[in-house]
Amino acid sequence: MDTTTFSALAEPTRLRMVEILKDGPLSVGDIAERLELRQPQASKHLRVLLEAGLVEVEAAANRRNYRLRTEPLEALDTWLEAYRKLWSERFDNLDDYLQKLQSKDNS
């Protein structure tokens, strides 16, 4: 798992940018407006997301539109899958344990 993805998403503003880009590409100005940031601040955060591979940019006339890339998020999901299995097993074990306790209390 590439820790660059975690580093980029650890900052709340960048995480919010990813959230709003999931609905489709937006310009820097649109992103800044939605997050109530100045455009230079938005550009700084978008540069970090771009370097982490989480977004891609395309120029359209005098606008730069940013689009979310799903590949890093899919890699993150794959990495988390092992932990989901672990959590599921632990919850199943807890459920079994609680049922045994309930059975003893009802006896």
Image (spheres, helix red, strand yellow):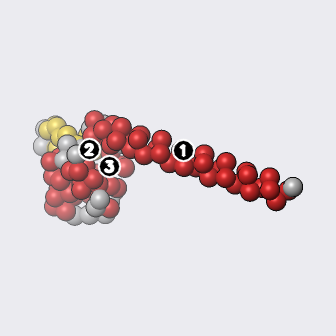
Q: Determine whether 52 is above or below 33 in the image.
A: above
Q: Is residue 52 visible?
A: yes
The amino acid marked with disc number 2 is: Met
Residue 68, image quadrant: top left
Frontmost residue, 58 versus 71: 71
- In this rendering, would 89 be left or right of 14? right
Q: Residues within 10 Å of mark 3 (few under 14, many from 20)?
A: some
Q: Secondary structure at mark 2?
A: loop
The amino acid marked with disc number 3 is: Val
Looking at the rendered image, the quarter that the C terminus falls into is bottom right
Residue beneath disc 1: 89
Frontmost residue, 101 versus 62: 101
Q: Residues within 10 Å of mark 2 (few under 14, many from 20)?
A: few
- In this rendering, would 15 be left or right of 51? right
Residue beneath disc 3: 18
Q: Residue at x 21, y 50 (%)?
A: 4
Frontmost residue, 18 versus 62: 18
Q: Secondary structure at mark 3?
A: helix
* Disc on the earlier residue, 2 or 3: 2
The circle drawn on residue 1 is: 2
- In this rendering, would 37 be left or right of 87? left
